[in-house]
């Protein structure tokens, strides 16, 4: 959000603007990971009937992903560490023995297993692309217009679903009919007077 605010401030210094128009969207992350998902599977998600640890044990065959050995306690470890943008989804976790987990530390699996490409391929085969960008866009969806309103100019919002519909039907521009989020000052003062008169 800070980057958007800084960019808007730079634009305002360079050009007079009458307002902002912003398009926000909600992402269906489950469908991004599996476009063909539908029905019960879509509603239940990938862990239906499983605990994460049980799912990992089954997927990895009860072996350390790095050494391929069975036996001994196994720990869940991040393929892409949280420090580097990894998430806690099962698709970003693997099982490793304590020694491997400690040796890997906060390294990315690609760096840790650089000398063992066949092991790296096996470990990352279950990993899916992280959805951190979609998650960030989704989490800032409501705060973006509020941040832009802080500049004191009118803000109009268009929503991704409107744009998709307009493209599919050929109606309107790509922006569709933006929804004003900040009414003009005259409307705000009229509304205040109307509410005050009803009290």
Image: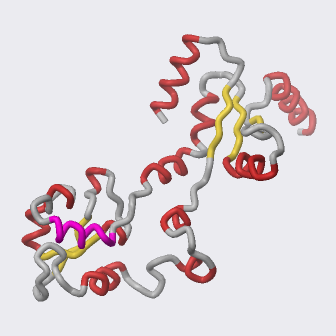
> Residue 194: image x %, image y %?
90, 33
Q: Camera-side residue: 143 or 98?
A: 98
| Left or right for 100, reference 187 | left
Q: Is residue 34 above or below residue 44?
A: above
> Residue 174: image x %, image y %?
73, 39
Total marks drawn? 0
Residue drawn at (61%, 12%) of the image:
15
| Left or right for 107, reference 31 | left
The magenta segment: 117-126
Q: Is residue 3 above or below residue 34?
A: above
| Left or right for 82, reference 35 | left
> Residue 164: image x %, image y %?
71, 50
Residue drawn at (83%, 44%) of the image:
171
Quarter where residue 59 is shown? bottom left
Scheme of image coloration: secondary structure
Residue 124 magenta: yes
> Residue 165: image x %, image y %?
76, 52
Q: Camera-side residue: 34 or 30?
A: 34
- Residue at the extreme front of the image, as rendered: 118
Q: Where is the C terminus found, in terms of image quarters?
A: top right
Quarter where residue 179 is shown? top right
| Left or right for 183, reference 73 | right
Residue drawn at (8%, 63%) of the image:
103
Residue 172 magenta: no
Q: Is residue 33 above or below residue 135?
A: below
Provide the major secondary structure of the magenta segment. helix
């Amino acid at each position: 959000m800070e980057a958007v605010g800084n960019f808007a401030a730079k634009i305002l210094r360079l050009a007079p603007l009458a307002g902002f128009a912003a398009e926000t969207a909600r992402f269906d992350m489950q469908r991004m990971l599996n476009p063909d998902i539908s029905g019960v599977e879509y509603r239940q998600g990938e862990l239906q009937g499983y605990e994460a640890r049980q799912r990992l044990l089954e997927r990895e065959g009860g072996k350390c992903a790095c050494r391929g050995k069975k036996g001994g306690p196994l720990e869940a470890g991040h393929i892409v560490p949280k420090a580097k943008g990894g998430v806690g989804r099962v698709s970003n976790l693997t099982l490793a023995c304590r020694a491997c987990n400690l040796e890997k530390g906060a390294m990315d699996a690609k760096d840790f297993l650089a000398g063992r490409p066949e092991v790296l391929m096996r470990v990352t085969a279950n990993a899916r692309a992280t959805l951190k960008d979609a998650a960030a866009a989704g989490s800032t969806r409501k705060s973006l217009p509020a941040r832009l309103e802080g500049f004191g100019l009118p803000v109009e919002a268009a929503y991704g679903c409107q744009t998709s519909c307009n493209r599919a039907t050929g109606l309107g521009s790509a922006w569709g009919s933006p929804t004003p989020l900040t009414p003009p000052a005259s409307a705000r003062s009229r509304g205040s007077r109307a509410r005050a008169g009803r009290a």
